[in-house]
Amino acid sequence: MLDLSGGFLYTASFMQVRKIHLKSFGCQMNKLDSSLVVSALTEQGYSLTEKAAEADVIVINTCSVREHAEERVFSHLGHIKHLKKSRPSLLVAVIGCMAQRLGDQLLAHEVVDVVAGPAQLHEVPALIDRAMADHNKHLAVTGNIRQPATSEAVLEDSHKLDDFEIVHDSDANHIKSQAFIRVMRGCNNFCTYCIVPYVRGPEVSRPPQAIIEQAKKLAAQGIRQITLLGQTVNSYSYRSGNKTYTLADLLEKVSAIDGVHWVRFITSHPGRFDASILHVMADNPKVCPYLHIPAQSGSDRILKAMNRGYTARQYIDLMETAREIVPDIAIAGDFIVGFPGETEDDFQATEDLIRRVRYKNAFIFKYSPRPGTHSEKRLEDTIPAEVKQQRNVKLLDVISEIAEQDNKRFLGRTLQVLVEGPSKKPHLNRAENADHPQLIGRSAHDYIVVFNGPESLTGRFVNVTITKTAPLTLFADLT
Ligand code: 5AD
Ligand code: SF4
């Protein structure tokens, strides 16, 4: 009897669920990493909490791509200092790109207990356990990040996390209908401004069998849309036997899986972009007619200084070919304004390129020198902050003006959308209705579509008719 109650008590305290709180900065790749780490921790018995104040462990997944992203992480660590004062047992793990870039320097921060780089994320649960047990700080980053992994063991390690089943999407809304699958890691391009090759290492493609198996599992769980992820996803290349598998092969194979309705891929690099990808898109209705393909600049001089490997003419030709093969294709892009030495003429060339390509949308970034990159070491950050800001605003205006005109073609058209769920910030100019709240859906072209409907449609495909358009949003009625 005594034994039993002792055993029960022991079990009860052992069963006490430890809580993790996750904060994720940065790109889609980081969101996927965050989801995978949370899944690995959930398997170890952790549960996820939205409230940092009730967490036993706070995991911060970081981004190094611009200085501002790093500053936000440091200010977040500042907030945590107060939490840790009232709860000294709170454990803080900083993971991702900043962890790889700053290593020991981050570990020395007074609130940080664990630091793990993008290639060590599969070790995070063990590192946290160790830190809990020995109350020491633990660091796991790659010594020589550009060293290609030669041994099978190291390669397998780097794929380990990717095979994890995603039980939590860091954007919880999307769990029911869509998922991301990483097809490759790293980047070999060395654009002169970019930190990615230094923090995520060389390109490594995952075996196609692993990707397809994962897609099948996700489809069996009810996932309807799969996005294949890679820093330069069109460079995907995997040699197996006599065949070299490409992104076009992956798109064919993943879209052939029962239950998968839509397949997308991000992000493409305009250099060495193979037309086979466009042909699969044209021939296969499951492959969404959407390309995210950053140009970064429209000036040949700047493109050269950026080491992008193409001219503005070549980029425009590629976009024209894309529109010939897939007439209705939606094109999205990224641009950097204020790269060292960018003159008014260079900037004008970028505006001209945007007007030629007519993007569905494009993200504009102000140049931020990243320590250790070629442009940071060799080129002075000459463009004043106000000029970067003016150029940023100007390009956003141009993009918005184009989207406003082009989106009108959707008026009266019926589109199929995948319903993501209720709108988090309902549009004020739309009627709200308790039974039919505002829902957000996405079209195959990646347009955000707002319409009223029952919440139960979340995760389903529905047809809607477009009644109104704005530069970034289409408004519709259920058909
Ligand atoms: N400064 C500003 N923007 C950058 N990007 C990458 N590195 C920098 C930098 N140092 C932008 C590019 C890229 C996007 C993800 O971030 O436009 O496509
Ligand atoms: Fe960075 Fe260029 Fe690689 Fe993109 S292609 S991740 S911008 S180095």
Image (cartoon, grey):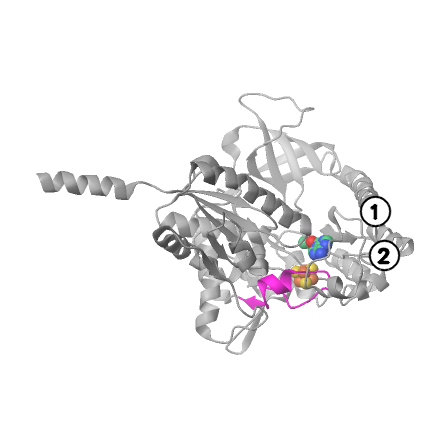
> Which residues make up the magenta segment?
186-205
Residue 130 located within the stretch drawn in magenta: no
Disc on res. 391: 1
Q: Is residue 306 left or right of residue 30?
A: right
Which type of secondary structure does the marked residue at label 2 adopt? loop
Kindly tell me whether mark 1's CB lies below 8 Å from ligand 1: no
Q: Residue at x 49, y 45 (%)?
A: 169
Q: Residues within 10 Å of mark 1 (few under 14, many from 20)?
A: many
Precedes in sequence: disc 2 or disc 1: 2
Horizontal arrangement in the rendering, residue 299 relative to residue 121 (left or right): right
Prevailing secondary structure of the magenta residues: loop
**Residue 203 rendering spot, x and y as whole percentages:** 59, 67
**Front residue of 465 and 377:** 377
Is residue 180 in view from this perspective?
A: no
State yes or no: discs 2 and 1 in contact (Cβ < 8 Å): yes
The numbered mark at residue 199 is none
Judging from the image, what secondary structure is the residue with disc 1 in?
Answer: helix
- Count of numbered labels shown in the rendering: 2
Type of the residue with mark 2: Glu
Residue holding disc 2 = 342
Q: Residue furthest left?
A: 1
